[in-house]
């Protein structure tokens, strides 16, 4: 007996648990992504003047590492922000998320694609072909992550002494989330041990096996860390801009404060 694929998909839509609300997840992802993109564009491109992105020992993660070139007429963050953008944009989790949320390809599990989608061309054309460079963007993202750790350490040391502020703590939380997101990456898992058939047969096999085991344990939570780190980056930038505006009256004179 022959059964049409469309009928099977429609039947699955109406019978599987939760399929009646399948649109909630892609819609939520679309809203979350859109808000973050709008805010980050404003922060990096439109709100770079006035140094609102730094205050006291704090530096916005959008601007780290801080590269200031006298001849560059635009925001210095543009020189850096493209690295984490490329890393996240080519991330396996994010690809699944925005394919569903914006391209409806497919919109959800067991949900048929829209009728206007007739052809699948894969990731062979621009800009989707850039997804094949994900591992190289990972290498650059690791460098940026190292600078973010340096910035976080500096946030706890100011005026030649220990300083603990709300900004220091949220910067620490942010860099921890970013580290967990980066180290749970599928490409990093392959780099440290995914291509090894025999750990005892390669140089540094024990260390590589340990790293591969750690990445494998946190890899299932890659999507969770992706969202936590996405909003923590924005939260740090927002907080620093509020402090820089003078809203909290912070002077950074003691060992504790904003």
Image (cartoon, rainbow, N blue to C red):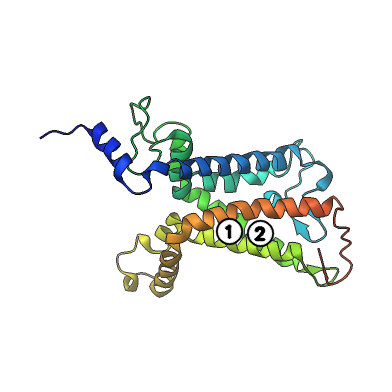
Query: How many residues crowd around disc 2 within 10 Å: few (fewer than 14), some, or many (20 or more)?
Result: many
Return the x and y of residue 195 as percentages of the image width and height: 35, 60
* Residue position marked by numbered label 2 in the rendering: 148
Residue 61 shows in this picture: no
Query: How many residues crowd around disc 1 within 10 Å: few (fewer than 14), some, or many (20 or more)?
Result: many
Regarding mark 1 in the picture, which secondary structure is present there? helix
Return the x and y of residue 116 as percentages of the image width and height: 38, 24
* Residue position marked by numbered label 1 in the rendering: 178
Q: Is residue 117 above or below residue 227?
A: above
Residue 106 shows in this picture: yes
Of pointers 2 and 1, the one earlier in the residue sequence: 2
> Left or right of 159: which side holds 78?
left
Return the x and y of residue 81 as percentages of the image width and height: 64, 45
Disc 2 + disc 1, Cβ < 8 Å:
yes
Q: Is residue 14 above or below residue 62?
A: above
Tell me which residue sits at (47%, 39%) in the image. 101
Q: Quadrant of the N terminus?
A: top left
Tell me which residue sits at (30%, 69%) in the image. 198
Tell me which residue sits at (35%, 26%) in the image. 115
Q: Tell which tag, 2 or 1, sits nearer the viewer.
A: 1
Regarding mark 2 in the picture, which secondary structure is present there? helix
Return the x and y of residue 135 as percentages of the image width and height: 46, 50
Using the numbered discs, state the Cα–Cα distance from disc 2 to disc 1 in whole angstroms: 9 Å
Q: Count the marks.
A: 2
Q: Is residue 20 above or below residue 114?
A: below
């Amino acid at each position: 007996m022959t059964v049409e694929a469309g009928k099977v998909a429609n039947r699955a839509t109406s019978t599987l648990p939760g399929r009646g609300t399948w649109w909630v997840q892609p819609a939520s992802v679309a809203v979350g992504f859109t808000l973050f993109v709008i805010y980050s564009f404003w922060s990096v491109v439109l709100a770079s003047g006035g140094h609102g992105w730094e205050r006291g020992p704090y530096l916005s993660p959008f601007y780290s590492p801080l590269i200031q070139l006298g001849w560059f007429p635009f925001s210095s963050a543009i020189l850096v922000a493209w690295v984490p953008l490329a890393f996240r944009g080519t991330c396996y989790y994010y690809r699944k998320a925005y394919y569903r949320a914006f391209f409806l390809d497919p919109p959800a599990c067991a949900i048929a694609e829209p009728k206007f989608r007739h052809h699948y061309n894969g990731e062979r054309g621009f800009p989707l072909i850039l997804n094949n460079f994900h591992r190289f963007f990972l290498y650059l993202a690791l460098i940026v992550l190292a600078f973010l750790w340096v910035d976080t350490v500096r946030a706890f040391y100011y005026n030649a002494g220990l300083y603990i502020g709300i900004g220091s703590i949220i910067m620490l939380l942010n860099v921890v989330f970013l580290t967990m997101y980066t180290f749970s990456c599928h490409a990093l898992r392959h780099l440290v041990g995914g291509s090894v058939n025999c750990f005892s047969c390669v140089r540094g096999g024990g260390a590589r096996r340990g790293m591969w085991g750690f990445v494998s344990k946190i890899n299932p939570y890659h999507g969770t860390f992706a969202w936590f780190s996405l909003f923590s980056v924005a939260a740090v930038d927002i907080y620093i801009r509020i402090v820089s505006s003078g809203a909290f009256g912070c002077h950074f004179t003691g060992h504790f404060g904003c």
